[in-house]
Image: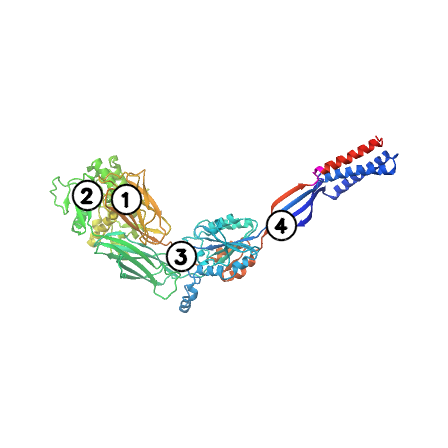
């Protein structure tokens, strides 16, 4: 049984927050009190009676004197037993805390109020005035700086201001509760600098300026809750449009807030109506083309709130760095699809002057509307027009029809120089061939082979090449960005599939060739022709568009009856792109239909595979289509050679278009003057931003230990526009150069209206409330309770009976009693 507990008696309260109290060990319950008092009374009565009887023969003075001494000693012992202590405490006050979290993603640059898709012309015209000119960020800056909401919050809370986009930022400002002298600390001064008084201006416009490429609402909110958690956290005011498009789900942040009993007050910014917007989502076009060659510029148009309505798409162009306005090159009218679905618009172009050309694709509605943003209505594409002939080596295992037609067509082409090796011709080259040069064997040296841009092989007999020449072919494609077009046939393709000596040639093919062609397969292949079964990639491939219009090109391919046979395959290799299958259902195997048209990148180069030597049948429709198919296929295969610059190197990029903030990975394949892989620890890469400023410090590409002569590095693009990459080639006065387009991301525009439903769920699950922006100033301070608290910062406990004078007093009383009894001759 516990007989004693601590009980305090308040003695004083100091203005400094210090308190003093004296504590005793006293009985805990009334029953314990009765027992203790009973025992003490009994002992006292017995002690007095025994002591009085013992001194009965003395006179009254000495009797009571000795009794007083004994009682004094007992009183001292009782005081020690009660264990008196003095407790001193110092308390402090922690004010209630409120955090304000502001959305700084790019969607906050959109107008606060938007026109809906079904609004009348008068409503649209009215929205284009003052209401539509104020952005969401402007509205938030006004709420923080002019509405008085922060001043009202500061009456009971200390307020910290944070922002978020792809990450949590801040605090940008810390406002003390008005219980103390109010101070604003900037993010810089809070790290150790001085404080700025409230009288000085806080630049709210700078704090809320939209810069983020994505909105990580859940992730940022969770990080903020973890960093400021405490008993005095009253709540977090989240000011956003609710467009959470990246990171973790906000539910995790809500659960963390519920555990801390902190309210989340959400303030919705922006209109909840479906916005109206048209944008050029992307532009696809070759980065390099030949003078006199037709090429295609394709734009993908997306819209919101305008499904079924018409839009005008324009193509404009001008020489790069020219001072004049761009000339209009074409106009097309399209019907917009459902929200977010792209509509492809293609323009066929042809340039007869070498140089770098800038093309602009613009879109606008054919009606008067107020868009969410007009900054995404135009996209730019830079294309280099090269005035140099493409060098093509044509190899044929025999004089098949396709070989003859393609050879003659290339020989007549003014921008192509053709050399021919017909493997069945005699060594003297007596067979007449239309070519710039007739070869009797495959090139022996790097200098000879590396001078070609494209090799077109019609069922070639690769076994006619020595092992060294086979290695040269592999190196030419991989390191020299060579383009290889191979046509499978029934004579020599089986050896590619099975001959171990041709392993490196087999690696170049984008498909897995079957080892054997059975007689039954050959016999059923000649029964009838079968059309190409195009994949989505095939329908969208620019080099397969053989007319000026995508629709008419598709009609020509439908009219083409196809081919009678295709070499059997076991599917495409990983990373390859299949454009078409052979549609004869009788040729289907466990791997599917035979691949008829496919391609793959092999190092810096590209390989295009055609599974039938019967494309000549297309000439029955029009030989122009046949010529275009082969010309565009050869150009497609040799596209990388235009970027190569010279035989000493190739600049390799994952793509030519990047989103703002992404990392660009650069790979360069370099050789020394003898065309051997360059040996160096690193090479310099000079990076120039859209304004022509060089990146400082410059980027150095480090040697790739797994690939001889290759160097890799990366950098991050920090502004939209055209960036240039230059790599000086060591031991040479030449350099590799490439340009990339940096665009703004679509994350913030894909769903730009306020997600009020999400904001309500976040608030209500934590006991908070959702408010539209115009109600926030008046209502938000009312919903945040004062959770300020007193807390102990220091405590001291002092034992009062443990004193020397008390010990001497007790000893003195006992000594006097003993001496008196001795003198009075008591036992």
Residue 230: numbered disc: none
Residue 675 is situated, as x and y percent measured from the top left of the image, at 23, 40
From the image, tell me which residue sits under label 1: 604
Looking at the rendered structure, the secondary structure element under dot 2 is: strand
Looking at the rendered structure, the secondary structure element under dot 3 is: helix
For label 3, the crowd category at 10 Å Cα-Cα, with few meaning under 14, some 14 to 19 and many 20 or more, is: many
Asked if the residue at tag 4 contacts the one at tag 3, i.e. Cβ–Cβ closer than 8 Å, the answer is no
Q: Give the image quarter of residue 556.
A: bottom left
Q: Disc 2 or disc 4, which is closer to the eye?
A: 4
| Dominant SS type (magenta) | loop
Residue 749: numbered disc: 3
Sooner in the amino-acid sequence: mark 2 or mark 3: 2
Sooner in the amino-acid sequence: mark 4 or mark 1: 4
Q: Magenta residues, as a range?
A: 800-804
From the image, tell me which residue sits under label 2: 395
Marks 1/3: CA distance?
Answer: 35 Å
Q: Nearer the viewer, residue 531 or 746?
A: 746
């Amino acid at each position: 049984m516990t007989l004693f507990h601590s009980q305090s008696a308040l003695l004083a309260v100091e203005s400094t927050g210090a308190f003093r109290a004296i504590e005793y060990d006293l009985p805990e319950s009334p029953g314990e009190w009765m027992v203790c008092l009973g025992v003490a009374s009994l002992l006292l009565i017995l002690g007095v009676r025994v002591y009085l009887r013992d001194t009965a023969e003395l006179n009254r003075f000495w009797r009571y004197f000795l009794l007083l001494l004994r009682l004094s000693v007992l009183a001292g012992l009782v005081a020690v037993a009660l264990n008196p202590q003095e407790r001193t405490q110092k308390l402090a006050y922690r004010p209630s805390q409120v955090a304000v979290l502001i959305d700084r993603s790019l969607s906050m640059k959109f107008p606060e109020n938007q026109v809906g898709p079904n609004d009348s012309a008068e409503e649209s015209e009215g929205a284009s005035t003052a209401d539509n000119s104020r952005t969401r960020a402007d509205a938030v800056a006004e709420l923080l700086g002019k509405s008085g909401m922060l001043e009202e919050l500061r009456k009971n809370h200390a307020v910290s201001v944070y922002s978020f986009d792809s990450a949590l930022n801040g605090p940008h400002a810390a406002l003390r509760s008005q219980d103390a002298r109010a101070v604003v600390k900037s993010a810089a001064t809070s790290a150790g600098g001085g404080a700025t008084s409230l009288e000085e201006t806080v630049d709210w416009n700078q704090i809320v300026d939209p810069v983020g490429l994505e909105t990580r609402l859940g992730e940022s909110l969770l990080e903020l809750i973890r960093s400021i958690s405490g008993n005095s956290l009253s709540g977090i005011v989240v000011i956003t449009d609710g467009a959470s498009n990246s990171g973790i789900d906000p539910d995790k942040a809500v659960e963390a807030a519920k555990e801390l009993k902190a309210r989340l007050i959400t303030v919705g910014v922006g209109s909840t109506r479906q916005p109206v917007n048209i944008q050029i989502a992307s532009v696809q076009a070759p980065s390099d083309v030949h003078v006199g060659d037709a090429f295609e510029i394709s734009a993908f148009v997306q819209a919101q709130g305008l499904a079924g309505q018409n839009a005008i798409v324009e193509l404009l162009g001008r020489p790069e760095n020219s001072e004049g306005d761009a000339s209009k090159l074409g106009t097309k009218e399209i019907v917009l699809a459902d929200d977010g679905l792209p509509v492809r618009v293609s323009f066929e172009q042809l340039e007869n002057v070498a140089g770098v050309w800038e093309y602009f694709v613009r879109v606008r509605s054919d009606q008067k509307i107020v868009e969410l943003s007009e900054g995404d209505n135009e996209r730019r594409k830079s294309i280099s027009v090269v005035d140099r002939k493409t060098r093509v080596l044509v190899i044929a295992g025999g004089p098949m029809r396709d070989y003859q037609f393609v050879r003659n067509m290339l020989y007549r082409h003014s921008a192509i120089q053709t050399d021919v090796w017909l493997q069945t011709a005699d060594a003297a080259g007596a067979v007449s061939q239309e070519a710039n040069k007739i070869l009797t064997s495959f090139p022996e040296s790097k200098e000879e082979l590396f001078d070609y841009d494209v090799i077109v092989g019609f069922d070639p007999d690769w076994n006619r090449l020595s092992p060294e020449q086979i290695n040269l072919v592999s190196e030419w494609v991989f390191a020299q960005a060579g383009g290889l077009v191979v046509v499978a046939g029934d004579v020599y393709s089986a050896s590619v599939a099975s001959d171990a000596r041709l392993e490196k040639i087999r690696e170049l093919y984008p498909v897995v060739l079957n080892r054997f062609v059975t007689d039954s397969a050959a016999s059923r292949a000649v029964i009838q022709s079968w059309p190409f079964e195009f994949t989505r990639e095939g329908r969208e491939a620019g080099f397969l568009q053989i007319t000026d219009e995508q629709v008419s090109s598709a009609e020509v391919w439908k009219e083409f009856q196809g081919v009678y046979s295709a070499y059997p395959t076991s599917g495409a290799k990983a990373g390859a792109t299949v454009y078409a299958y052979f549609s004869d259902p009788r040729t289907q195997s466990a791997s599917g239909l035979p691949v008829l048209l496919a391609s793959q990148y092999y190092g810096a180069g590209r390989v295009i595979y055609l599974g039938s030597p019967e494309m000549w049948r297309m000439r029955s429709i029009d030989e122009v289509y046949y010529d275009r198919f082969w010309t565009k296929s050869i150009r497609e295969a040799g596209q990388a050679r235009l970027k190569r610059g010279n035989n000493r190197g190739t600049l390799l990029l994952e793509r030519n278009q990047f989103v703002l903030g992404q990392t660009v990975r650069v790979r360069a394949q370099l050789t020394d003057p003898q065309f051997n892989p360059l040996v160096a620890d690193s090479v310099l890469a000079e990076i120039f931003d859209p304004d022509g400023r060089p990146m400082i410090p410059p980027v150095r590409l480090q040697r790739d230990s797994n690939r001889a002569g290759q160097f890799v590095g990366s950098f991050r693009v920090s502004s939209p526009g055209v960036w240039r990459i230059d790599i000086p080639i060591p031991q040479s006065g030449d350099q590799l150069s490439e340009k990339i387009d940096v665009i703004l991301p679509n994350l913030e525009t894909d769903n730009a209206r306020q997600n009020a439903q999400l904001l309500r769920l976040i608030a209500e699950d934590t006991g908070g409330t959702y408010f539209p922006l115009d109600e926030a100033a008046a209502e938000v301070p009312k919903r945040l309770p004062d959770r300020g608290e007193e807390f102990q910062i220091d405590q001291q406990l002092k034992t009062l009976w443990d004193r020397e004078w008390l010990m001497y007093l007790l000893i003195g009383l006992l000594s006097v009693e003993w001496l008196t009894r001795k003198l009075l001759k008591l036992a």
